Amino acid sequence: MNTKGKIAVVTGANRGLGLETCRQLAQRGLTVILTSRDEGKGQSAADQLRKEGLEVRPFALEVTSARSIEKLRKFIADDYGRLDVLVNNAGVFLDPRGDGDPSASSVLRADLDTLRASMETNLYGPLRLCQALIPLMQGSGRVVNLSSGMGQLSEMNGGCPGYRFSKTALNALTRTLADELQDTRIKVNSVCPGWVRTDMGGPNATRPLEEGAATIVWLATLPDDGPSGGFFRDKQRIPW
């Protein structure tokens, strides 16, 4: 993709992987709409990147709200008339962490409200955003869904069912979209960024933000002959 003058949206971008993804995309010449549930934090994050000379605009977005997503769609349509990249980064990890009791996150003890809330943010949010924003791509664009190795069926383990179920379902959304859009120049892929040092990943994670964001940005700027409907880590396809 020729990135100069392109328009990108990154969700959940006031910190961590989302913020670093905004930075790397803007460094490649894209105008980035940095979305955040907290308007103040989004503004501060955008100001930080603008001080680095990058073209970034903040926008308050709650991915579980259809009304909020419609406001974003209208903003993009009115100000730019199109969209080139959508990075569905916003996500939650709501399962109990254990705190010395490994069975606390067992599927046998799973709270249905936790499962539903996980799906609302990690699956239905990206779905609503795709429904609203893919038409603005006008047949050519890139969609990157932030998934996880914890959503791989081929290596599925126990525990943390809310997060696992939602990321597996997000991968199914990726496959479905890619198939339905195969006759366009829109590429849709999932990415596992690895264990990254973020608020979610924790301080013991093995990857810095720059490394975690690299494959996201690669997928967001694929050439027209690039892959679609795949699951990637370190720019390499991995099993579903």
Image (cartoon, helix red, strand yellow):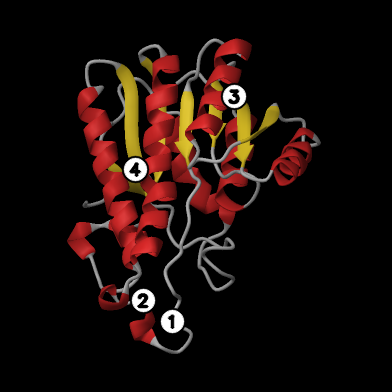
Q: Can residue 147 be seen in this view?
A: no
On screen, residue 50 versus residue 4, left or right, reads: right
The answer to whether mark 4 and mark 3 are in CB contact below 8 A is no
Q: Distance between the residues labelled 1 and 3?
A: 41 Å
Q: Label 3: few (<14), some or many (≥20) within 10 Å? A: many
Q: Can residue 158 be seen in this view?
A: yes
Q: Which residue is drawn at 27% across and 73% down?
A: 107
The answer to whether mark 3 and mark 2 are in CB contact below 8 A is no
Residue type for callout 2: Ser
On screen, residue 37 versus residue 39, left or right, reads: left
Which residue position holds label 4? Answer: 190
Residue type for callout 3: Leu
Front position in the image: 172 or 215: 172
Which of label 3 and label 2 is nearer to you? 2
Give the mark nearest the N terminus, 2 or 1: 1
Compared with residue 168, is residue 54 higher up or lower down, i.e. above or below? above
Q: Distance between the residues labelled 4 and 3?
A: 21 Å
Disc 1 is placed on an element classified as loop
The answer to whether mark 2 and mark 1 are in CB contact below 8 A is yes
The answer to whether mark 2 and mark 4 are in CB contact below 8 A is no
Which of label 4 and label 1 is nearer to you? 1
Number of on-image labels: 4
Which residue position holds label 3? Answer: 30
Residue type for callout 1: Gly
- The residue sitting at the bottom extreme is 100
Which residue position holds label 2? Answer: 105
Front position in the image: 37 or 152: 37
Which residue position holds label 1? Answer: 98
